[in-house]
Amino acid sequence: MYAVIDLETTGTRTSWHDRIVEVAVVHLDEYGQVTGEWCSLVNPGRDLGPQLIHGITAAEARRAPRFDQIAGHVAGLLRGRVLAAHNLHFDASFLRAEYKRAGFQVPVDPADGLCTMRLASHFLPSAGRSLYDCCRAAGLPPYRAHSALHDARAAAQLLVRYLASVGTPPPWEAAVTAAARLPWPPMPAASVAPVQRQTTGYREQHFLARLVDRLPRLHEPKGDAYLDLLDQVLLDRHISATEADALVATAETLGLARVDVEHLHRSYLAGLAEVAAEDGVVTDAERLDLNRVADLVGLARSEVDTALRIAMTDSSRQQRHRRDQWNLNPDDLVVFTGEMRPQRSEWEAEATAAGLRVGDRVTKKTRLLVAADPDSMSAKAEKARQYGIPIVHPSAYKQMLTGLAVSDAGTLPGDRSVVGAR
C-alpha cells in the first residue's frame, strides 16, 4: 500500500552533482501496520558532503553498493505503492536523478505521493516543518535524526497518525489506486547485500589480523615498498580504512606473512625511537607519539620501552641508517577536499600565509592532500592515491604547519617532532 522513504545525501541539490549516500524504505499496509523495511548505505563515488550532519564515514560508504547496483531492488520496493516521505519533493528529485543517471525514467512525482510535511498543516497545525517537530507535536517518541532508517520509521509513524485521523477510506484513495497503475520500466534486480551503518563503538579488526600467518618466516623480507607506504600512512598518526586495505594489499603483493610485517613494524618503531633518543633525552610528547605508533601498527607498549632502551644505550646509533623526516616546506603545493570547519577558504588562506601554495586539483606536483575524511572518495582523493600523495586529516595538517620550515636554515626552533619519516 505505502512505501515510506528517506534519503541521506551529500548535499541539497542534484544540479550540483549531489548524490544519495543512504536510502531506507518502510512498507505500511492499508491499516498502517509495518510489513517490512529495508535500508542500505550507498557509495556515491564522491566526497560525502556534510558528514557532521548525516554521520556517515567514507570507510562505511566505500564498501556499500552504488545506486545503479541497487536500483532494481529499490524499484521493486516502490513499484505499485504510494510513495510517502517527509518533504517528498526533496526525496523524489534525488530518486529521479539517480535513476536517470542509471539510465531509467521512473514515475516518481511528488504530485502522485504523500508528503507528511505538507499534510502536517492539516493534522498538526501547531507543528513546524521539520520531521522532529512534527513527531513531537504528534506525541511520538524521539528518534535518531539524520539516519535514513530512523527518519523513515519516524515518517511512517507520522503517516500512521494521519491514517488514524482520517478513517477508511482515506481522502487520498485515488492516489492509492493510481500508484498501482504507474508504469515502472523493467530493470534487473541484482542480488546485492545492503550495507548498514556501523553501530556506535564498532571497531574494525586490526589490519594485521587479515594477513596470513605463513611459516617459516622470510629471512630477509623485501619490505622497502611496505615501509615507504607506512611512512605515508602514519604521517597523520591515523590509519584509515582505505590505508589499512592498501597496507594489506602491499604486504600480500610482496609475499609478506603476518610475522614479516610485525618484524618490519618493530624495525620502524626502532627507527623512530632512535630519532627521539639521539639527543639523550626522550620527552613526554615523544614517548606519547611512539606509544601512538605502536598502537596503530599492533605492537605492545612494552615494545616502545624496549626500542627506547636499545636506542639510548646504543653508542653506534649515530652511524646507523636513518630515513629523512617528512616535513612540509615553503612553496609546497597543498590541496584541500571535503567540508571543513571553519570554511575551506579559511584553511586555504592560512596555508597561503604560511608560505604554501594552494591548488584546486591534485597533480603529480601536489605535496599533500588535506581531507576532512581521509577515506574520502572524492576525485581529488582518488587522484592522490593514484599518485602516492599523502592524505591527512586537518588536525594532523595543523601540526605539520607548526613544523613548517621558515628559512633556508631548517625547521622552527625547538621542533623535534618525530611525525613520520620518509
Image (cartoon, rainbow, N blue to C red):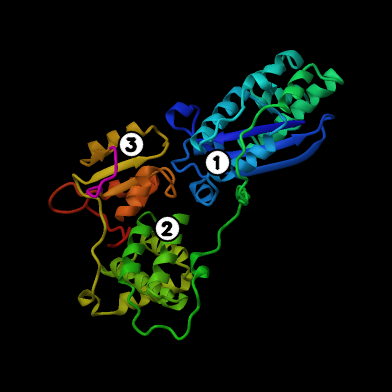
Going 30% across and 49% down the picture, which residue do you hit?
400
The quadrant the N terminus occupies is top right
- Choose top left, top right, bottom left or bottom right for residue 217: bottom left
CA distance separating discs 1 and 2? 20 Å
The residues tagged by marks 3 and 1 sit, at their Cα atoms, a distance apart of 22 Å
The mark closer to the camera, 3 or 2, is 2
* Residue indicated by mark 1: 55
Q: In the image, what residue type sits under mark 1? A: Gly
Quadrant of the snapshot with the C terminus? bottom left
Q: What element carries label 3?
A: helix
In the rendered image, which residue does mark 2 sit on?
Answer: 243
> How packed is label 1: few (under 14 Cα within 10 Å), some, or many (20 or more)?
few
Instruction: Give the amino acid type for the residue marked by disc 3 in the picture.
Output: Trp
User: Quick one: SS at disc 2?
Assistant: helix
The stretch drawn in magenta includes residue 380: no
Q: Evaluate whether residue 272 shows in this view.
A: no
Q: Is the magenta stretch mostly helix, strand or loop?
A: loop
In the rendered structure, find residue 226 and report the number of the disc placed on it.
none
Please say if the residues under marks 1 and 2 sit with CB atoms less than 8 Å apart. no
Tell me the SS state at disc 1. loop
Which span of residues is magenta-colored?
360-366
Residue 210 spot, x, y in % from top left: 51, 68
* Dots 3, 1 in contact, CB < 8 A: no
Q: Which residue is drawn at 35% across and 56% down?
A: 235
Q: Position of residue 208 (x, y in %)?
A: 49, 69
Residue under the point 53% across and 52% down: 63
Disc 3 target residue: 347
The number of numbered discs placed on residues in the rendered structure image is 3
Please tell me which of labels 3 and 2 falls first in the chain.
2
